[in-house]
Amino acid sequence: GAVVSQHPSWVICKSGTSVKIECRSLDFQATTMFWYRQFPKQSLMLMATSNEGSKATYEQGVEKDKFLINHASLTLSTLTVTSAHPEDSSFYICSASRYRDTVQETQYFGPGTRLLVL
Amino acid sequence: QKEVEQDPGPLSVPEGAIVSLNCTYSNSAFQYFMWYRQYSRKGPELLMYTYSSGNKEDGRFTAQVDKSSKYISLFIRDSQPSDSATYLCAMSANFGNEKLTFGTGTRLTIIP
């Protein structure tokens, strides 16, 4: 159990276009979902935290108008990179956490989406 | 100063050796300590988590936390080539729906 999927696994787009990345919890309901970004040879950096039905909370330095997050249901969150530029090229990873027997469990990570902006 | 420091390696050891991976941290609010394994171009996979100080063992893996020294370790016994990956430590003040602060990861290679 506790499987998180992401789609697409990789995407190449032209500069100025928008890209949507989906994150799904396949076998559990995720109370909270997180979006991370990882540049080569660097660690994961949290971009934003989202709870179902409410606005996402963005980390300092992350442009909320550029990285749109929608957590429409307990199993789906989307990240849209608007007007993408080459510097947005990165590995985007989502995670999800859940309650199990009234206990909040740790985060389960998706496989990541590699974005290349030309 | 970063909140979490981790030697990026790379670290190469022969198969069967004991591997020691470490992280130090500065934020005394951290109570939960996790170790993740990440294969190339994949998402992190949770290996172990520990609350507060102490040891936890799971098969060939042992996690240790020393809050007084702000130092955590992951030991891998009888290392296998399949253990070759990047190992990330992560920490948080609360569990679950709380921001995780990651180390930079240590790239480990087990040589057959």
Image: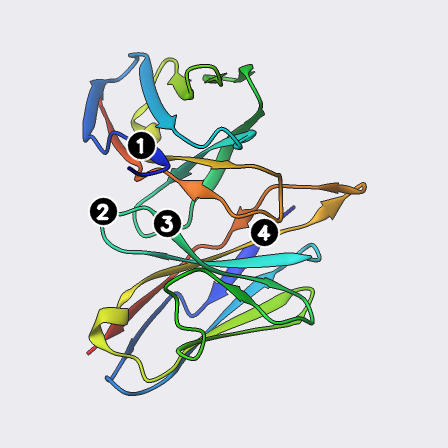
Mark carried by residue B5 = 1
Residue visible at 60% across and 41% down in the picture:
A106
The CA span between labels 4 and 1 is: 29 Å
Instruction: Say if B1 sits above or below A99 in the image.
Output: above
Q: Position of residue B71 (x, y in %)?
A: 40, 20
The CA span between labels 3 and 4 is: 19 Å
Query: SS for tag 1?
Result: strand
Residue beneath disc 3: A44
Chain under label 4? A
Residue beneath disc 4: A3
Determine crowd level at label 1: few under 14, some 14-19, many 20+ residues with C-alpha closer than 10 A: some
Q: Are marks 3 and 2 in contact (CB under 8 Å)?
A: no
Chain under label 2? A
Residues tagged by mark 1 and mark 3 found on one chain of the structure: no
Query: SS for tag 3?
Result: strand
Q: Amino acid at mark 2?
A: Lys
The CA span between labels 3 and 2 is: 10 Å
The CA span between labels 2 and 1 is: 14 Å
Residues tagged by mark 2 and mark 4 found on one chain of the structure: yes
Q: Amino acid at mark 3?
A: Leu
Q: Amino acid at mark 1?
A: Glu
The CA span between labels 2 and 4 is: 25 Å
Sequence order check, earlier mark of 2 and 4: 4
Determine crowd level at label 3: few under 14, some 14-19, many 20+ residues with C-alpha closer than 10 A: many
Sequence order check, earlier mark of 3 and 4: 4
Residues tagged by mark 2 and mark 1 found on one chain of the structure: no
Left or right of B71? Residue A71 is: right
